[in-house]
Image: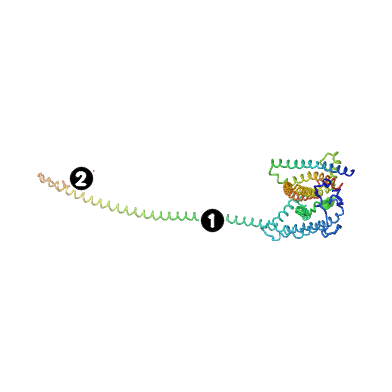
Amino acid sequence: MEGDIVQMGAYIGAGLACLGMGGAGIGVGHVAGNYLSGALRNPAAAAGQTAFLFIGIAFAEALGIFSFLVALLLMFAV
Amino acid sequence: MAADANDAVGMPQLDFATFPNQIFWLVVTLVVIYMILSRVALPRIGSILAERAGTITADIDAAETYKRQATEAEAAYHKALDDARAQAHRIVEEMRADIQADLDVAIAKADAEIAARTAESERRIAEIRDSASAAVAEVARDTAQEILTVFGVEAEQKAIADTVSARMKGGAA
Amino acid sequence: MAEANGGLNIRPMDQFRVEPLFGGDYVGMFTITNVTLWMALTVLAVTLIMVVGARGRALVPTRSQSVAEVAYSFIYRMIEDVAGRDGVRFFPYIMTLFMFVLFANLLGLIPWAFTTTSHIAVTAVLALAVFITVTVLGFVLNGAAFLRLFWVDSAPLALRPILALIELISYFVRPVSHSIRLAGAMMAGHAVAKVFAGFAAALGAAFFIPVLAVTALYALELLVAVIQAYVFTILTCVYLKDALHPHH
């Protein structure tokens, strides 16, 4: 019974950790949206900035992956 | 999966027992890929790209040369055309001058001939007129003498001639 | 995971297990495992594309040769743009990283394949190699001046120590995020695909719904595989730029 409660806590925690992915999604959307609005204002400069777009997305996305990792650890490793 | 009795660990990624194996093979793989890329692939592709860039540059240069040659040929053609045109013009001018000279000579000759003929004609006209007037004077004298003879007037031959010639001069004036 | 419920028996993490190819359970350092197999296939794929594809040395590239050329000039320009012209001497190293990550990711998408880059051990070695190279290179090239990377001159004096601390922490978090991003993205996609495939098996007649989902997910995973390789490489270039030009 005690083990079940620990497992339940881990699963709930994993679910909560997945909330972090929402934040990462907001962040990625923010980066991409701002890139797009900037690119529409000055399309000539857009091509040179795609590298920074991907770097920004990578940084924002990394945090979502961290939360996914926490969820995985809670589910499979704890 | 932690509850699964068959699995010693839940996440295979955290099974540290497999780490040396993975790291060993990863290092081997990376070294092999690095060797393949740095020894064979990258120099080859780099040389292909450089060769292509060289070829493109050479082709562009050749095209430039051809274009310049074409421009030069066009200029030469235009020059030749202008020269030919100028020469033709000159020849036309010369011809025209020659013809003009010939024409002038011919006109002069013709004028001279015309003048000579005119003079001749005038001379002959004058002769004819002179002879005609002489004939008229004689006729007039004779006629006058006859008339006088008919009227019974005895007149001096000389006086009649003088009178006739005087009247004819007056008539002519 | 769901054994307690009985019916659903989806084990999404099993695909990541390292197992010896020729029997036995023991995984020693030199054991030939599925890791070995798929890394060898990665080497084979890289060789096929980069060596055999460009074998013709055609002036007007064939299809396979232009793939190799595109990969070459893509990474070359990325280094030039991000790390600067003097970063070009690290081109073979960065190309090696890119090629390995790209083909490991793509080969991992083959059904029943083992994705080597989904393992923290692999990506951590890649990221630590970059981290150590960049740090050593920074100190060798710039000496103590490399530490100015953490001392933001443009900030007010009072803020600088705090900023230096933040910069220092973020510097040491780099290899962690660098490696976990790649492994996490790969692991996540494959685990989700496995879960959906398990649904297809469990749903019976309505199996086509998860199958459609898996198909869509596969397209996304293909994109993610390429983008993660790109991101891994471009971050390497960004870190390399810090070592070559530590002034902000």
Which mark is on residue B168? 2
**C96 lies above or below A26:** below
What is the chain letter for disc 2? B
Q: Position of residue A70 (x, y in %)?
A: 84, 45
For residue C89, say whether it is visible: no
Residue type at mark 1? Tyr
Q: Position of residue C218 (x, y in %)?
A: 74, 49
State which tag comes first along the sequence, 2 or 1: 1
Q: Secondary structure at mark 1?
A: helix
Which mark is on residue B16? none
The residue carrying mark 1 is B77
Q: Please name whichever residue, C44 or B57, is drawn nearer the observer in this view of the structure.
A: C44
Q: Determine crowd level at label 1: few under 14, some 14-19, many 20+ residues with C-alpha closer than 10 A.
A: few
What is the chain letter for disc 1? B
Q: Position of residue B167 (x, y in %)?
A: 19, 44
What scheme was used to colour the molecule? rainbow
For residue A3, say whether it is visible: yes
Q: CA distance from mark 2 to mark 1?
A: 85 Å
